[in-house]
Amino acid sequence: MKIILVGYGRMGKAVEAAALRRGHSVAAKVDPVAEDAGVAGTLTPDLLKNADAVIEFALPQGIETNTSLYAEAAVPAVIGTTGWEDRRETVAASVIRDGGTVLWGNNFSVGAHLLFKLTAEISRLTEKLPDYDIMIHEFHHKMKKDSPSGTALTLAEKVLENNHRKTVVQTQTLNRAVRPEELHVVGIRGGFLPGVHTVTVDGPFDTVELTHTARSRDGFALGAVMAAEWLIGKKGFFRVEDFIDDLFRKEL
Ligand SMILES: NC(=O)c1ccc[n+]([C@@H]2O[C@H](COP(=O)([O-])OP(=O)(O)OC[C@H]3O[C@@H](n4cnc5c(N)ncnc54)[C@H](O)[C@@H]3O)[C@@H](O)[C@H]2O)c1
């Protein structure tokens, strides 16, 4: 595949390496700030011509403009950019209206998807055990701009879908007792960690902790390239889970 990288920061560079390792080529890189050689400052319809796929790890401000350019150019796009939950439905509607192809995900690491599945299961099991409470925390490097992380919000979604005692995701600092229906989700920032997510299930006598630790960005990058391979030939607005569920079905 000829891939266009939109966003050439830490993740863009990791995706480039993963794409080359899987035998793809990088046709163009776009980033308004990156000073590396061969990086275009602006995304234009011309750049998208002749590309097989776009992989975007950028910042959420450009999401509407970028996704409509991808749809207009009929280039399938994998979006790893996080922090646009508030615009998800508008973007989905315009991608579908314009006949485009977008797959988005808050986490492209296969290991993190194992944590999502385990979180769904433990949330379901503890629904009938009201003494066991659930909470989520995550650590990320000091440069990360959104908090809590998109992955933490996806974990929260899994809890709410499977444990009906929890109905509200609470991301604020609490200067009062947490309510039983609130799921407290907290992001901690500092250092260089590429991402550590923990779901804690705590009862009166014991604690169960499920943790995913990313050791580098390579797992996210590989997942994004594999998702782009999967997306070729499809039409519509997909979640990374559509690709992962297919992968788990084939591998297991
Ligand atoms: N989905 C996942 O698996 C996953 C994993 C890691 C990071 N992320 C997300 O990916 C994004 C990028 O992370 P990062 O660590 O590479 O950040 P980064 O700050 O290192 O790089 C982001 C780059 O995007 C560029 N950019 C901003 N707006 C742009 C636009 N409109 N077009 C093109 N480039 C643009 C910036 O100049 C910057 O160089 C963040 O939203 C992060 O949360 C997602």
Image: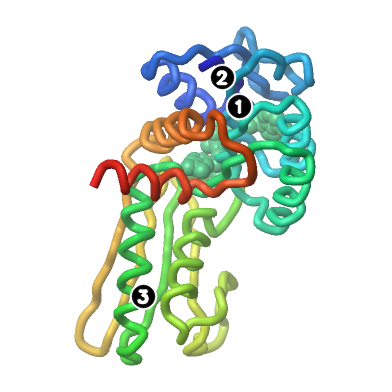
Chain-order first, disc 2 or disc 3: 2
Residue 30 spot, x, y in % from top left: 67, 21
Residue 49 spot, x, y in % from top left: 71, 15
Q: For residue 167, which quarter of the picture?
A: bottom right
Q: Residue at x 71, y 56 (%)?
A: 89
| Numbered circle sitting on residue 3 | 2
- On screen, residue 86 versus residue 193, left or right, reads right
Tell me if residue 234 comes above or below residue 130 in the rendering. above
Closest to the observer: 101 or 135? 101
Q: Quadrant of ligand 1?
A: top right
Q: Residue at x 66, y 13 (%)?
A: 50
Check disc 1 and give the amino acid type: Val
Q: Residue at x 44, y 20 (%)?
A: 19
Tell me if residue 218 comes above or below residue 199 in the rendering. above
**Dot 1, how many residues are within 10 Å of its Cα: few (below 14), some (14-19), or many (20+)?**
many
In the picture of the structure, the residue carrying the numbered disc 1 is 54
**Cα–Cα span, label 2 and label 3:** 39 Å
Can residue 19 be seen from the camera position used here?
Answer: yes
Q: For residue 108, which quarter of the picture?
A: top left
